[in-house]
Amino acid sequence: MALSVFSISARAEGIKIKSFELERVDNDWVLNAAFHIELSPGLEEAVQKGVVLYFQTEFELTRSRWYWFEEKPVFEQRQTRLSYQPLTQQYRIASEGFTFSAKTMAEALQAVGSIGGWRVVDNSQLDAGKQYTSSLRMTLDLSKLPKPFQVNALNNRDWNVSSDWLRTPFSPSGPNLIKR
Amino acid sequence: MNSFFTSKAWRKRATPIAIGAIGVFALMLLVLLSIASSNTEFFDRYFIWLYAANMIIGVCLVLVILALVTVIGVRWYRGHFGTRLIAKLAMIFALVGIVPGLILYGVSLQFVSRSIETWFDVKVESALNSGLELGRVTLQVAQEEILAEGNFIAEQITQVPSGSSSEQVGAMVMKIRNQFGIQEVSLFDMRRNLIFTSELKPNKFLPAPSADTVEEAFKKKGLTFVEQIEVQGGQRGYRVRAVVPIVRKKSAQGKFESNKDVEDKYFLQLVRYIPTPLAKNIFAVESAYSEYQEKSLGRSGLRKMFVGTLTLTLFFAVFVAITLALLLGRQLARPLLMLLKGTQAVAQGDLSPKPELNTGDELGMLTRQFNVMTRQLADTRTSLQESKAFLEKVLGSLTAGVCIFDKKYNVVSSNAGADRIFGQDLTYLDGKPLSASPALREFEEAIKDGFATMKLAVTGGDKSSATQISHQNIPVWQKQIQLHTTNEYENELGVTLFVRGTELTDDLRMVVFDDITDVVSAQRSIAWSEVARRLAHEIKNPLTPIQLSAERLQHKLAGKLSPEQEEMINRSTETIISQVQAMKEMVNDFRDFAKTPAPQLRPVSINSLTTEILGLYEGSPLRTNLDPNCPDIMGDPTQLRQVIHNLLQNAQDATLEGLHPGEAVEVKTELVPYGEHNGIEQKAVRLTISDCGVGFPAKILARAFEPYVTTKSKGTGLGLAVVKKIIDDHSAKIEIRNRMQGTEVIGAQVSILFMNLANEAA
């Protein structure tokens, strides 16, 4: 019973990866991705009350080694800041120096969830002949929350918003476009 | 359980280490948490982990506290030695630690909850709301104003006759702009190309809005929005923008006749900056509002945080209190428990030294003093035991009998001497009166009598009686008593006792007595010797003159008297002479008895001596039973011959006088064991002579060896006295008794025990 309730709520809220695209441009790989973000009512209320949410997007390339820990040649992360301005009743999204306003929460979350033109991999760093695994996820960065909310988040599942890792095989010398 | 964990030493060491580690860890985390409120980057990053770790530690502390309490509870239940004291001390210490902690906790908790709530006030909230609304309205008004002004300008532009140059339009717009005080007015065509702008500096104008916005503006006949901008100095400002569509109807020109009404579409963009002070205030209101809302939303978390920290502090305080309480309790209780164990051991008689506590405080001193006390106790006990053993030995080896009685003449204690004198073990009489043994009834009566007389004398004042002497003011009575003289135990010899009695305390009476039978008889025999010697001397002297006188009378008167007279004189003289002769003999006997010479001791075979004497009695019925194993004894043959001779004579006489005159007299020698000395069995030679006469009457039996005591119709009664004297001089023992067959006396028996054997003396 409790499990089913939990699974339903988990389906309704959280972060899901809608699309994933890794494209080779010249010598770099550019990431385009879209996340579907659904916040719990509590979190939405918190945003509207002025709590600033930081969404962290992490991308990494790993290669497993049988004799040691995984090699991790690439680890990139970027933060997107979501805030609400009560005066103009607008949401502001700021990421990598770029700001955007949205009138509704849905718009704002869509803006947060869309990532485009992120240069994540420099091909020269990689060994062309090896096979890698690319991983991507987006989480709500709880450590950036005000401390009282962190205490709340400690025992509240609604506040632990995170997507699963999306793992795809990656080969530097493979096809120029990887899509999911 | 694992054997590793059952190892006691390991457990003993591990528990304090584990508790200490948890304590230090908890303290560290608590300190970290308390300084985490200062906003450093480190704590910002790890605050959540710190908080979670503290919570876990809190749970651990609670578990440890519960475990400690459970351990004590279990030990209490099992009655583990010393647990009660430790538990009590721990409880007291814990109370001392916990109660103030709880009070502080309660007050702080109340204070925190209240003060957090007081931050959030309806009035403050409504004021902030109103402020925000004020800002909103201000912006709204600015929007409406700029839209109205835009519409006015648009109207003006549509009314500009066609064909007028853009400079003309520009001049007009500038004029209106200056009039309204709009910062920037720009005119764009539908391709969002600039036609005209009021901005004088090139390329400084605000670019056209997006196509979507323009389309929306055309639909809604004008669109306004507020934008947040950054002004110089990093401050934020607000910009109100309006997009106003302009539609100019143009008469159709020749080329496009089909279209009657051709519409020229443009749009205006008007920009006005909200004055900086106003913008600043609006922003301040907004940020305050946001902050307030955020805080208000997060207050439950804030409270949780404070409560959590406080609770954790309380747990820690309780933990420290209980741990310290246990440690201190154990520390305090240890010497007490040691003392308790010590006293229990002492109570059970173990006076060995107990472990001491080497601390400088009073408790350590107490344990040391306890040991000193125990040692002294042990010393005292040993010396007491030694003196008691000494006393017992002295009492035991006393030949005198000692008896101690209580008020009711029950025996409290008696010594070995008493046992010896009465010939029975008196220990069974402890707590009973002497009369419990029939043989001692007489003795008890004498004692009671003695004490009664003493009482009388004491209560009667200073009058001292003959039987009571006063020695150092302690009243003592003494008397001589004779037991078994007139009772039915006729064949037992009477015992003469010299008894002294005194009162030790009101409850205890002591009686000391000596068997003086031998002394008495020796005294008697000495007295008799003296009497005999004097009598002999006094009587013998006149005898010779009497005899001579009688003889002279006979001699002188011979032939001078008539035959009748002469015959009478002769008869009388004969009688005098024979009687004097008899008297002389008797007197000589007495002299001999008194002057028996000291025996010349040399080895003598009792068997050959007996055989030799028996040769004189040939013809008389005699039965001999001589033991050839008898060793030589030390004795004077002449005196011994007289002894045997006397005894045989007596036996023969008794047999002849008895009921069976033909019966034989039995002479018997044998080697008998006689006690032990230094572990070697002593031997003695016994000579027994038994007759079949009438035996001795009880009165005679007791004093048979005294002179003038005899059963014979004639005789001096000196025979046995002489025998006794000789036997005494030989350090031998003589015993005389009646031979019994049932209750009938069938004769007498005399036994002599020679203990002085020749081989021993040599």
Image (cartoon, rainbow, N blue to C red):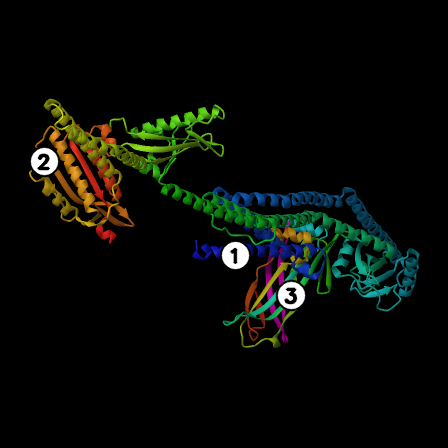
Above or below, comparing residue B549 to residue A139 in the picture: above
Q: Give the Cα distance between marks 1 and 3.
A: 50 Å
Is A58 placed left or right of B354 in the picture? Answer: right
Q: Which residue is mark 2?
A: B664
- Farthest residue in the front direction? B560
Q: Nearer the viewer, residue B216 or B258?
A: B216
- CA gap, disc 2 and disc 3: 149 Å
Q: Amino acid at mark 3?
A: Gln
Q: Please tell me whether residue A28 is drawn above or below residue B206 in the rendered image.
A: below
Q: Which residue is mark 3?
A: A77
Mark 3 falls on what kind of element? strand
> Are the residues flagged by discs 2 and 3 in contact, CB closer than 8 Å?
no
For label 3, count other residues whose C-alpha is less than 10 Å away and answer few (under 14), some (14-19) or many (20+).
Answer: few
Q: Which residue is mark 1?
A: B13
Residue A31, magenta (yes or no)? yes
Q: In the rendered structure, the residue with mark 2 lies on which chain?
A: B
Q: Earlier in the sequence, mark 1 or mark 2?
A: 1
User: Label 1: how many residues lie within 10 Å, few (<14), some (14-19) or many (20+)?
Assistant: few
Q: Position of residue B76 (x, y in %)?
A: 50, 43
In the image, residue A167 lies at what x, y percent? 55, 65
Give the total number of marks visible in the rendering.
3
User: Does any portion of residue B706 appear in the rendered image?
Assistant: no
Q: In which quarter of the view is residue B166 placed?
A: bottom right
Query: How far separated are the C-alphas under marks 1 and 2?
Result: 101 Å
Which chain contains the residue that carries disc 1? B
| Region of the chain picked out in magenta, as a range | A15-40
Report the front residue among B420 and B375. Answer: B420
